Image (tube, rainbow, N blue to C red):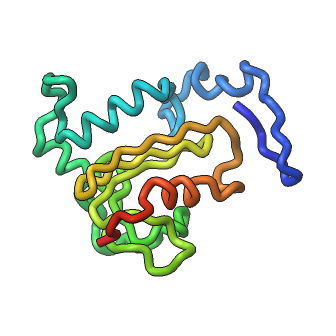
Amino acid sequence: MYDWHEDGSLTREPDEVALEVQWRDWPLKPGSFGLISSLDDYMRFARMLQNEGELDGQRILRPETVRLMATDALPADVTDQGFLPTRAKWVFGIDFAVRIRPPANAQEASGAVGEFFWDGAANTLFWVDPKNKITAVLFTQYKPYGKVPLHKAFRDAVTVGYPTL
């Protein structure tokens, strides 16, 4: 894990600091804690979701389960979603954020209605776009989150030429 500094430099955290959240005995693990994966395994996970729960001929989840995970599960009165301001209009499904409208302007991240995604604390990102058959995974290992506009640049590069509706 690296700490990003305003001058653009990175400082590597000692392993015991970077992994402390994994090893600590938490009464209730906070979000973004406890998940460690390789890029290849995470991409396999995303491909399984893209294939409605099937990967390499093996059924992992039922298609209905994947659809439920990517369906709005928020009560209508939950309107404050300000912690992802560049993500266009999205809602929470069970496990993922789900885009419900196209980008309103050039500052919002590109993508299609119906895609589902998640951003990680170390500036990681994955999304599945069922309509355009896009599965993307970006792994970085620096914090704090969002100081470098890498997610938007990555999304724009992957989705150029694809419809957003």
- Looking at the image, how many numbered discs can be counted on the residues? 0
Look at the image and tell me in which quarter the N terminus lies. Answer: top right
- Residue furthest toward the front? 161
Left or right: 74 as drawn, with respect to 40: left
Question: At 41% from the left edge and 31% from the top edge, which residue is drawn?
Answer: 42
- Could you say where residue 157 lies in the image, as x and y percent from the top left? 51, 56
Question: At 70% from the left edge and 55% from the top edge, which residue is drawn?
Answer: 148
- Could you say where residue 140 lies in the image, as x and y percent from the top left? 61, 38
Q: Vertical placement of 12 versus 46: above or below?
A: above
Left or right: 141 as drawn, with respect to 137: right
- Residue furthest toward the bottom? 104
Question: At 11% from the left edge and 36% from the top edge, which residue is drawn?
Answer: 62
Q: Vertical placement of 55 versus 134: above or below?
A: above
Question: At 27% from the left edge and 61% from the top edge, which residue is drawn?
Answer: 114
Q: Vertical placement of 41 versus 99: above or below?
A: above
- Residue furthest toward the right? 7
Determine the image quadrant of residue 11: top right
